[in-house]
Amino acid sequence: MSAVTFLPNPSDPAHPPGHALLRFPSEIDFSNARDLLGVILASVRTPARPRVLVLDLSATLFMDSQGVRLINDVRRLLRPGTRVYVVARPDSAAGRVLELTGLRRDVPVYDNLPEAMAA
């Protein structure tokens, strides 16, 4: 299954100006994390680079340490000044992984998409 099928166009006009939204697949692990990183970086390296990148993990049912590494790599490789927000329900697998690894301290994590897009 291709990672590209999970990611919409980040320049969707429904998003606030300067925001890009990328929805993550139901599973993030060793089998797809590298491909996802390439797709994410390619999608935001456009002439209208976003100031805010929202990574939506609300449909992610499984995530291991590769998902945490993916988010950190995205943060590290984006243009300086680009903010990264994450959407993950606290009771979800992704939310628990973000909490256990301490990533929630370093990246703003929102419980739902409207909160993240309004931030």
Image (cartoon, grey):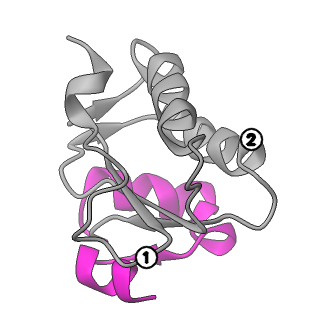
Looking at the image, which residue is at 36% across and 55% down?
11
| Eye-nearest disc, 2 or 1 | 1
Query: Residue 118, located in which quarter of the rendered image?
Result: bottom left
Tell me the quarter of the image containing the N terminus: top left
Residue 71 in magenta stretch: no
Q: Quickly name the residue at label 2.
A: 77
- The image shows residue 104 at horizontal and vertical percentages of 57, 69
Q: Tell me how far mark 2 sits from mark 1, CA to CA.
A: 22 Å
- The image shows residue 43 at horizontal and vertical percentages of 47, 37
- The image shows residue 119 at horizontal and vertical percentages of 46, 88
Three-letter amino acid code at the position of disc 2: Leu
CA neighbours of label 1 inside 10 A, class few (<14), some (14 to 19), many (20+): few
Residue 98 in magenta stretch: yes
Q: Is residue 27 above or below residue 88?
A: above
Q: Quickly name the residue at label 1.
A: 17
Dot 2: element: helix
Q: Which mark is residue 51?
A: none
